[in-house]
């Protein structure tokens, strides 16, 4: 049959092609420095990505390892998909570590205790910072830099013109808030819009108050799901924020609930710099200066804006601060990934982060205070050093669905504070299921 | 030329990465895949020929359609059955709880709002797309500058839903009443109607309609082009005869144009209904489901990735599937009716 012969010839041809293909996929081994590529999954873009590139340049020069960086704002979903597909990135740099904790418990993150020189790390990192990176007693993430939350930004010129003093205690802060209001101004700007993460800036207010008002024990059992949202301590933090800072119906805040919910968090500080000021104070993490730099006209650090740390709500928890930072974890054990993790913990790498600004503070103690580019970041570095009780962002430590419900609760709370009880009941309901399988 | 050279230099193109193509894989895709298909048909033809002559026409189509059935079974039917089974088990996946997940989901106030919103999308999105599309097709048919107008209206079709959402964020932009509005919609509200600006995305009175409008803006051009083609397919003599008989334009539209276009309208309409059920991007980008705007597909995504609750996400997937079935049946019936008329 003529068809049969044709088939056989074609079959031979196919086999030949497949053999060629198989040969071609084998790659020649590299020599010399470590070489190769490290695939990193992260969230940075724009100025932050440029800073990351600057930090990585000496690493590539020294080791010959190329950086392949994949950016996504939806890190949790992308990471889980990649891991589930058996195709994890070598290294993941995550701003929120809820998912990483889950993954670490499931054994999907590689412990670093035997991969790093721990005595050197202990010498360079404060014990608090190493402990923040531990899950079930094993070190799984390394902080490349830290940032402070709970900083109140203000315009020193506006304060001077009205004779306002920087408050040193919580009572002074509330007195100042009421004085600004009676002078006809708006004390606060609050901006909560952040697309899929809308509401988080308000949760920063709340968790800072929880930590400072009720202490680290309550804070820890709360984020771990062992303390109810409707418990007196957590509820008190909501009412403190609502009544003392926001005022009834949001009357202490420029633009009220509508403006709070519709305004992107990065634009929230613009009210400080108008003449006359739309508001006098704005609570946001140290990173916000990189957004200030984008305002027109661009405000100058020191003369146009300054910051003070949110005062202690209760003196029994003095010096308590919520801190954050980007955590590096190894999701695939390769020589390149080990070298990278080692590098981000060095003073050399962190020196580059802090010099480029953006509110990043070095975790490595070898980085000198003189390396900070402006008095504001230097003051923040000093605050980090004097912090007595450091806790990671509670929202980032919660399971992702708990955190999302927390943010949503903030949006509902600012709209109508009288609904607090039903908001807390709903959060309790989410708490009951969110921690299942996460313990 | 010097300018071009410096431009190319400034681009800093990473040629190595750009030109690194997995050549063997490319060869396999370009040569081996068609080859294997060819061999499959040839090889099976040999087998078919061993069958008695009369049985051959019955066997052959099954062999040709076999790979497709196999693929659909593996990547569609198998996961679908898996999802349905999964929806009857608890979160851990080990205990059978019957309809427990469904009862839990339907008693959750949040899910009821999700279903209400899906219903809004289901009713408003296809209806508005069809009304606008049909009106524009009719109007454009009567002007000399039809082509540029249709091209302009069709253009949003080329934009992804995510980019559309970003564009409309500017349209809906909100600023407090004491400063000038920069979003066009609030500028109109404040300057023309002397009213307070509205937070279109956050205000639960308007936000669902604001989101649906974005999708309508994107799909109207598509509907218009297809309906316009159907309109042009109506014989001119028919319309002329009706007008000669004294029918006014409204009667011509209702008694002649509409019935003749009905098959096309149904096809466009059912496509839009399926789009409405699958809607995700716009809500994800604009509100992330906040402010009572959540819809099934986004909620399913949140349950799957954020909560990693496979019981809830499977349950929502099945609810979505059940909602699509009547639309599919209707669509198939309509196709059959059109076929029968030929």
Image: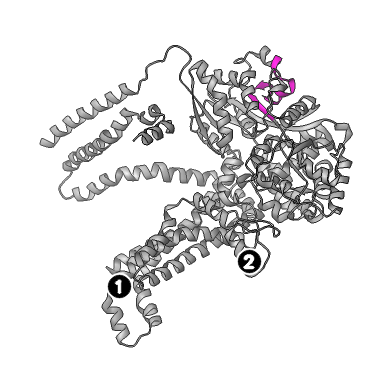
Disc 1, SS: loop
Look at 57% across and 41% down and name the residue there.
Answer: B305
Let me know if residue A141 is in the magenta part: yes
The residue wearing badge 1 is B234
Whichever of labels 1 and 2 marks the residue nearer the N terminus, that label is 2
User: Which residue is rendered at x = 64% and y = 69% of the image?
Assistant: B193
Provide the residue designation for mark 2: B191
The circle drawn on residue A436 is none
Labels 1, 2: front one: 2
Q: Is residue B131 above or below residue A387?
A: below
Query: Residues at badges 1 and 2 in contact (C-beta under 8 Å)?
Result: no
Picture residue at 54% right of the left edge, 60% below the top: B212
**In the foreground, A79 or A314:** A314
Image position of A226 with respect to B313: above or below: above
**In the rendered structure, which segment of residues is drawn in magenta?**
A122-146
User: 10 Å neighbourhood of mark 1: few (<14), some, or many (≥20)?
Assistant: some
Provide residue B240's location: percent of width, then percent of height. 29, 81
SS label for mark 2: helix
* Residue A288, horizontal then vertical, whole percent: 68, 38
On-image quarter of the C terminus of chain B = bottom left
Using residue A306 as the reference point, say whether residue A294 is left or right of it.
Answer: left
Check the residue under mark 2 and report the chain it is in: B
Residue A107, quarter of picture: top right
Q: Is residue B211 left or right of residue A8?
A: right
């Amino acid at each position: 049959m003529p068809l049969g012969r044709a088939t056989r010839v074609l079959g031979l041809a196919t086999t030949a092609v497949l053999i060629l293909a198989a040969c071609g996929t084998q790659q020649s081994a590299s020599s010399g420095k470590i070489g190769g590529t490290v695939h990193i999954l992260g969230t940075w873009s724009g100025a932050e990505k440029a800073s990351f590139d600057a930090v990585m340049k000496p690493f590539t020069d020294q080791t010959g390892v190329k950086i392949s960086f994949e950016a996504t704002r939806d890190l949790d979903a992308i990471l889980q998909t990649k891991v589930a597909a058996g195709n994890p990135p070598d290294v993941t740099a995550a701003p929120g570590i809820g998912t990483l904790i889950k993954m670490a418990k499931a054994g999907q993150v590689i412990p670093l205790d035997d991969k790093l020189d721990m005595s050197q790390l202990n010498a360079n990192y404060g014990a608090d910072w190493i402990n923040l990176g531990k899950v079930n007693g094993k070190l799984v993430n390394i902080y490349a830099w830290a940032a402070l939350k709970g900083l109140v930004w203000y315009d020193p010129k506006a304060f001077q013109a009205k004779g306002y003093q920087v408050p040193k205690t919580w009572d002074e802060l509330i007195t100042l808030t009421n004085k600004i209001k009676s002078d006809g101004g708006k004390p606060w700007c609050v901006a909560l819009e952040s697309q899929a993460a809308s509401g988080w800036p308000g949760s920063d207010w709340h968790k800072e108050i929880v930590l400072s008002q009720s202490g680290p024990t309550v804070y820890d059992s709360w984020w771990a799901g062992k303390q109810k949202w409707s418990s007196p301590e957590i509820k008190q933090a909501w009412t403190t924020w609502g009544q003392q800072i926001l005022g009834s119906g949001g009357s202490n805040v420029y633009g009220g609930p509508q403006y709070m919910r519709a305004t992107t968090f990065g634009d929230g500080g613009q009210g400080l710099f108008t003449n006359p000021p739309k508001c006098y104070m704005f609570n946001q993490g140290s990173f916000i200066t990189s957004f200030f730099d984008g305002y027109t006209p661009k405000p100058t650090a020191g003369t146009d804006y300054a910051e003070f740390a949110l005062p202690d709500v209760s003196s029994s928890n003095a010096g308590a601060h919520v801190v954050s930072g980007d955590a590096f974890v190894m999701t695939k054990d390769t020589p390149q990934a080990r070298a990278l993790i080692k590098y981000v913990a060095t003073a050399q790498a962190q020196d580059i982060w802090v010099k480029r600004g953006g509110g990043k503070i070095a975790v490595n103690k070898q980085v000198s205070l003189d390396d900070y580019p402006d008095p504001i970041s230097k003051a923040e570095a000093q605050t980090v050093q004097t912090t007595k009780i450091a806790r990671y962002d509670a929202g980032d430590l919660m399971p992702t669905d708990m955190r999302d419900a927390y943010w949503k609760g903030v949006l509902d709370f600012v709209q109508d504070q009288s609904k607090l009880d039903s908001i807390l009941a709903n959060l309790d309901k989410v708490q009951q299921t969110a921690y299942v399988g996460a313990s | 030329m010097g300018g071009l050279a410096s431009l190319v230099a400034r681009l800093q193109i990473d040629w190595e990465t750009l030109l690194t193509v997995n050549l063997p894989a490319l060869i396999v895709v370009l040569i081996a895949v068609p080859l294997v298909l060819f061999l499959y048909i040839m090889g099976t033809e040999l087998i078919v020929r061993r069958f008695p002559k009369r049985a051959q026409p019955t066997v052959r189509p099954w062999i040709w359609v076999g790979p497709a059935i196999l693929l659909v079974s593996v990547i569609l039917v198998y996961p679908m059955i898996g999802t349905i089974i999964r929806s009857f088990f608890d979160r851990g996946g080990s205990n059978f709880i019957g309809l427990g997940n469904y009862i839990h989901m339907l008693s959750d106030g949040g899910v009821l709002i999700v279903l209400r919103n899906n219903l809004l999308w289901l009713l408003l999105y296809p209806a508005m797309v069809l009304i606008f599309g049909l009106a524009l097709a009719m109007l454009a048919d009567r002007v000399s500058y039809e082509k540029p107008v249709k091209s302009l209206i069709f253009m949003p079709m080329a934009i992804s839903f995510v980019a559309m959402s970003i564009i409309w964020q500017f349209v809906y932009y909100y600023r407090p009443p004491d400063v000038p509005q920069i979003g066009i919609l609030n500028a109109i509200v404040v300057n023309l109607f002397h009213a307070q600006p509205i937070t279109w995305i956050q205000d639960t009175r308007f936000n669902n309609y604001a989101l649906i409008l974005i999708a309508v803006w994107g799909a109207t051009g598509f509907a218009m082009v297809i309906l316009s083609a159907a309109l042009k397919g109506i014989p001119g003599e028919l319309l002329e005869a009706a007008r000669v008989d004294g029918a006014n334009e409204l009667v011509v539209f209702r008694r002649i144009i509409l019935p003749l276009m009905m098959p096309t309208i149904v096809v466009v309409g059912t496509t839009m209904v399926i789009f409405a059920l699958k809607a995700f991007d716009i809500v994800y980008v604009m509100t992330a489901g906040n402010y009572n705007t959540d819809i099934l597909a986004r909620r399913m995504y949140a349950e799957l990735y954020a909560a990693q609750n496979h019981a809830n996400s499977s349950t929502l997937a099945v609810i979505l599937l059940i909602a699509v079935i009547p639309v599919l049946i209707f669509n198939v019936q309509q196709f059959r009716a059109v076929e029968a008329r030929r």
